[in-house]
Image: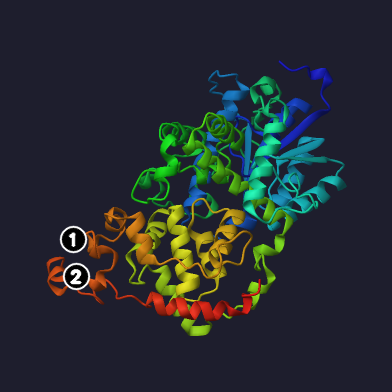
Amino acid sequence: MSNQNNKQYDIGLVWFRRDLRVDDNAALYHALKRCKQVYAAFVFDKAILDKLPAQDRRVEFIRETIVELSANLNMLAQHGEVDHEKSGVLLVCHAHANQEIPRLAHSLGAQAVFCNHDYEPLAIARDGTVLGKLANLGIAFHTYKDHVIFERTELLTQQSRPYGVFTPYKNAWLKKLSESTDRYYLKPYPVKKYANALAKVASNTPSPWQVQIPELTDIGFERTNLKQLKIPIGANGAKSLFEDFFERIDHYHQTRDFPGTKGPSYLSVHLRFGTISIRHLASVAYQLSLQGNVGASTWLGELIWRDFYAQILFNCPHVATHSFKPAYDAIQWEQGAIATRLFKTWCDGQTGYPIVDAAMMQIKTTGYMHNRLRMVVASFLVKDLGVDWRWGEQYFAQHLNDYDLSSNNGGWQWASSSGCDAQPYFRIFNPTTQSEKFDADGKFIRRYLPQLAKLSNKTIHQPWLANPLELEAAQIVLGQDYPLPMVEHAQAREKTMARYAVVKST
């Protein structure tokens, strides 16, 4: 139990955003520790939601997660005891967060608002507005690191500059962690220790705030196929996924590149919305890596990439709209109707390259795409079709359940060679070679392109090379049941080399 007499504030408000969990939540911990009474709030922010289509898996994921978060907060407030009174801890509303959070804090008589950092430019601008409004009301605004292990300028080169190359960054990341006392940066926040500060609110909270979670239709959305996909929701879902992955982590380095194999952790959407603690994941991976576990060490590297891209976005915000390397903005991409046609064909999974088309069907039907395939389809759009990487980045932003601006932008700029520590411009993935190497038996292709299921393991990667008898036996008419290749890779590669000539000196 905490000592209420030593608290800094009488009343505080914790604002949940992309940290939708109770356990090991930095902002929630600090609010509970520093305030005698803590109210909790979540906003279905119209500034974000009004730009989305009526069916969006992410909104449904968030809504279902908020239901669980509300229940977990109630349990925390009741110290594990079930309470059937018509009251709860979490206040929710569907409005503009930059307007309603200051109003709510003021109406509650809060002296401080607590939340966790968000590194995206629009979020930083939103938080700046909230900070100003709270300051005018005499209310403090405290924010904390929770989404990454190291942020902003915590890791700098010897020249006091942000890292632009991953390997030195990774080495500095590991060094700082190893030198910290008692692995300070991975220690969890003991939220439950201060749970008695959580305040319950009446069910008749004034509009627009309420304690009952609105239905999707109440906020202008429709159900998707999220439940049919059986995507685990909330902190409990994240926990079950990590427990499953922990049994496979030893082999991660051997299985992660094969889309037809259960190799990844599938935790990316949970990291995106903070339903699991990055400190917990990194701690487990780090401890195993110290024991020589190659799979865990490889996965830890992926978590470090996530930190790397987050600090790039914060320190170099121009990457949100321009190339990290300015010289690459001089590249002349396809324009007009030609670019639109090429892009649509790619989006529709009609390129004639099965591994590309299967991946595009995966993202369209599930909101997920295997990481190896993200690189393959991005390389194809940019370097086989000559379409601006920003078009693909925006398509992913619209369709990925785990969309995160920093990682998505970093991945696309890596593929287009315009980003930090990106692949050289002359490295161009051959989609057929990638398909034969990482989906050798065609298992993934058959899952998303069932019309090709009867082709042999050899020809399924290049249907246009199948002999007429095999095509007939498989009941495939090329150009009708499945398209012919829209470009010839070798020729496209030559065009790309010419296109990138403007940046040869970089």
Query: Upstream in the sequence, badge 1 or badge 2?
Result: 1
Location of residue 463 by image quarter: bottom left
- SS at badge 1: loop
Q: Which residue is mark 1?
A: 454
- For this rendering, which residue is in front, 330 or 271? 330
Image position, residue 453 (x, y; %): 22, 59
Q: List x then y, in percent, for residue 437.
A: 35, 57
Q: Residues within 10 Å of mark 2 (few under 14, many from 20)?
A: some
- Tell which of 378 and 28 is nearer to you: 378
The reply to whether residue 175 is in sight is: yes
- Asked if the residues shown at circle 1 and circle 2 are in contact, with their CB atoms under 8 angstroms apart, the answer is yes
Amino acid of disc 1:
Lys
Query: Which residue is nearer to you in this view: 371 or 222?
Result: 371
* Residue 177 place in picture, x, y as percent: 68, 35
Q: Position of residue 425 (x, y in %)?
A: 55, 69
Q: Is residue 256 above or below residue 414?
A: above
**Residue found at x 52% / y 30%:** 288
The image shows residue 270, relative to residue 79, as above or below, that is below
